[in-house]
Amino acid sequence: AQFIANRIRDDVAAHRFEEVPWQVTISIGVAGLAGDESLEALVDRADKHLYVAKRSGRNRVAGF
């Protein structure tokens, strides 16, 4: 999942959006489903990883 997230992040950073006068980048939080974890708990962990990625300098992938 992190490999795919990094490919998506790289592709977005490399793309030039004609309507946007600056470079677009994204940060992604990745989490894997653990045992009998609820969907809500999974999304919450992914969200926490997203904010770790943003605090680490943005345009990053964080997780697991």
Image: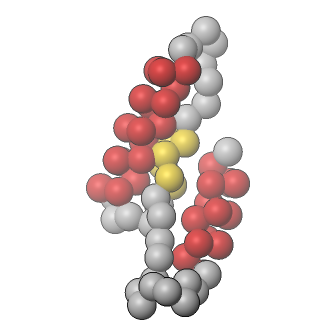
Q: Residue at x 48, y 64 (%)?
A: 26
Residue 59, by quadrant, is bottom left
Q: Is residue 27 left or right of residue 37?
A: left
Q: Considering only vertical position in the picture, is 35 above or below 50?
A: above
Residue at screen point 49% across, 46% down: 29
User: Among all residues in the image, which is located at the extreme front?
Assistant: 19
Left or right of residue 4: residue 13: left
Quadrant for the N terminus, please: top right
For the point 34% across and 47% down, the residue is: 51
- Which of the pair 20/32 is nearer the observer? 20
The image shows residue 5, relative to residue 46, as above or below, that is: below
Along the line of sight, the residue nearer the viewer: 46 or 16: 16
Q: Is residue 64 visible?
A: no
Quadrant location, the C terminus: top right
Residue 25 pos. (x, y %): 47, 71
Colour scheme of the picture: secondary structure
Where is residue 8 shown, x and y percent of the image? 64, 63
At 68% across and 54% down in the image, what residue appears?
Answer: 3
